[in-house]
Image (spheres, grey):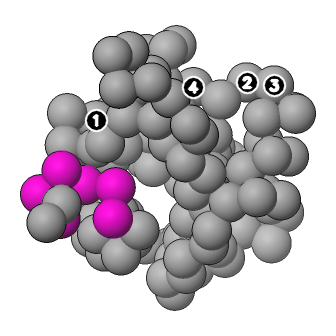
Amino acid sequence: MLPSRHRLRRSAELKRVRQEGRRWHHPLITLLVYTHPSSENSPSPSRFAFVAGRRVGGAVQRNRVKRRLREVVRHQLPDLLPDRDCVVIARPDAAVATYQELEAGLDVLFTRAGICRTSES
């Protein structure tokens, strides 16, 4: 389970990420990232929301994909930069992907988006 301080909950927050954030695509996942302004003294933790539409499959498949994506993000939280709101959208092929494929896909997207501490220059 993702800690509550790392979750996007309000629809207004999701709407802001969709409208003002940047997008990165992968065959399995789409990542939307909004960097919110914060003071250097008190950075806020990165927050995430997970979306799987009906094209991904039935309720069981959608929930399974979202659980796997949440677990991948939970393991990567220490390596992610603060002050980011992210929406992770599962694409239809994610329903048949393995955990390792989803993990590799998110690694690629986090690196492209520049939100990993290791990708910082």
User: Would you say the residues marked 4 and 2 are in contact, meaning their CB atoms lie under 8 Å apart?
Assistant: yes
Residues at marks 1 and 2, CA–CA distance in whole angstroms = 18 Å
Q: Secondary structure at mark 3?
A: loop
Q: Amino acid at mark 1?
A: Leu
Q: Position of residue 107 (x, y in %)?
A: 28, 65
Q: Which mark is residue 7?
A: 4
Q: Does any portion of residue 25 appear in the rendered image? A: yes
Q: Which residues are magenta?
A: 114-119
Residues at marks 4 and 1, CA–CA distance in whole angstroms = 12 Å
Identify the image quadrant of the N terminus.
Answer: top left
Residues at marks 1 and 3, CA–CA distance in whole angstroms = 21 Å
Density class for disc 3 (Cα within 10 Å; few <14, some 14-19, many ≥20) is: few
Q: Position of residue 49 (x, y in %)?
A: 63, 40
Q: Which mark is residue 77?
A: 1
Q: Residue at x 28, y 35 (%)?
A: 77
Q: Amino acid at mark 2?
A: Arg
Q: Which mark is residue 14?
A: none
